[in-house]
Amino acid sequence: MAEEQNSKIDLAENRTDLAKSRTDWAEDRTVLANERTFAGWMRTGLAAVGIGLGFNALFGKLQPFWLPRAIASLFILIGIFIFYMAQRNGCRVQRRMSAHDAKPMKGMNLQLIAGAMATGSICLAIGMWLIEMPDN
C-alpha cells in the first residue's frame, strides 16, 4: 500500500514538472515571437521611410518645390512613429516575460536599434530638405 501511494506521489510530481516545463517553453516561444514581431515592425518602418525617399526621388521636380518633400517627410515621420511603437511594445512584452532556455535580446537593445533607425531617418529627412534648394 505504501509503495502504491509513493508511486502516485511520484507521478503527481512528474506531471507538475512536465507542466512547468511546458509553461517555460511556451514563455520562451512568446519571448522569441516578440522579437520576430519587433523585426517585422522595424521592416514596416523602414518601408515607410523608403516610400518617402522614393516619392521624393520620383516626384522631386513637382511644383511647388516643397510639396514632394513634405509628402516624403510625412512618410518618414510615419516610419519614425512605427520605430517608436515597435520598441515600446517590444520592451513592454519583454518586461512581463522571462526567458528560460531562450536567449532574448535585452530591452535596451530594442531601444538602441529603434533609436538608430529613427536617427538615420531624421538625417535622411534633413538631407532631403537641404539638397538642391531652389534659387528664389
Image (cartoon, rainbow, N blue to C red):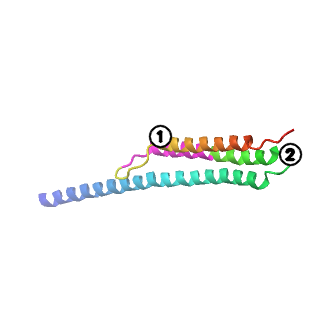
Residue designated by label 1: 108
Quarter of the image that includes the C terminus: top right
Between label 1 and label 2, give the one nearer the viewer: 2
Taking the image as shown, residue 96 lies to the left or right of residue 115, namely: left
Q: Which residues are magenta?
A: 82-99
Q: Nearer the viewer, residue 45 or 8?
A: 45
For label 1, the SS is helix
Residue 117 appears in the figure = yes
Q: Based on the picture, tell me whether residue 7 belongs to the magenta stretch.
A: no
The residue lying at 70 percent from left, 48 percent from top is 75
Q: Based on the picture, tell me whether residue 89 belongs to the magenta stretch.
A: yes
The residue lying at 24 percent from left, 54 percent from top is 13
Q: Position of residue 65 (x, y in %)?
A: 83, 45
Residue type pointed to by label 2: Pro
Q: Residues within 10 Å of mark 2 (few under 14, many from 20)?
A: few
Give me the C-alpha separation between circle 1 and circle 2: 42 Å
Residue type pointed to by label 1: Met
Residue 1 appears in the figure = no
Taking the image as shown, residue 25 lies to the left or right of residue 69, namely: left
Of the numbered discs 1 and 2, the one sitting upstream in the chain is 2
The residue lying at 34 percent from left, 52 percent from top is 101
Q: Vertical placement of 59 versus 96: above or below?
A: below
Q: Position of residue 2 (x, y in %)?
A: 12, 57
Q: Vertical placement of 15 versus 104: above or below?
A: below
Quarter of the image that includes the N terminus: bottom left
Residue designated by label 2: 64
For label 2, the SS is loop
Taking the image as shown, residue 110 lies to the left or right of residue 104, namely: right
Q: Position of residue 67 (x, y in %)?
A: 81, 46
Magenta span: predominant SS is helix
